[in-house]
Amino acid sequence: MQTLIDNINTKFLDSAAYNDVGGRVFYRKATSPDYPRIVYSIITANPDNVFQRKGESVLMQFDIFGADSAGDAAVNTIYADLRTLLDDWQITIAGYGTIQFTWQNTVTISEDIVLEDGSSGVVHIAVDYEITYQA
């Protein structure tokens, strides 16, 4: 699984989505309190075996967080750039074969959080991708 995480990190580098959040892209938890940011994690992983081939289906969530004070346009731009980056992305990793990213759904959440600058409100967009492979 670490190979998949490493490939996702590489994919983000110098992308529009990465630049939109000032490089604040984290796996599992943010190490910076600054906004905007993207935090991604594995939600579920299930076997996806077909005949003699072993595979896996992974549901991964990419959470976009932005301060309300930055406005909807900023978060919507990050969302659009994330979708452009990951929708239908295919990579080949030794031992895993071809890995396919397929967008599943998006949920928008407003959170009432007091930020360091004293303002409140965070827009949270959760974007789910199914990642499948057969080795």
Image: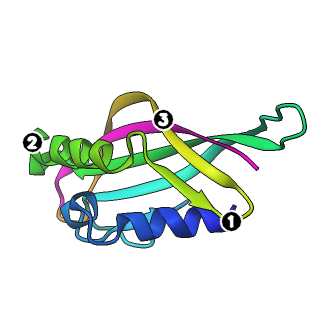
| Label 3 or label 1, whichever comes before in sequence order | 1
- Which residues are the magenta region? 118-135
| Label 2 or label 1, whichever comes before in sequence order | 2
Residue on which the image places disc 1: 94
**Foreground residue, 128 or 56?**
56
So how many labels did they put on this image?
3
In this orientation, does residue 121 appear?
no
Tell me where residue 72 sits by quadrant. top left
> Tag 3: residue type?
Thr
Q: Residue at horizontal 38%, vertical 28%?
A: 107
Horizontally, residue 52 falls left or right of residue 42, namely right
Please identify, in this view, whether the residue under mark 2 or under mark 1 is nearer the observer: 1
Horizontally, residue 108 falls left or right of residue 81, namely right
Image position, residue 10 (x, y; %): 43, 70
SS category of the residue bearing label 3: strand
Residue on which the image places disc 3: 102
| Separation of marks 2 and 1 at Cα, in angstroms | 39 Å
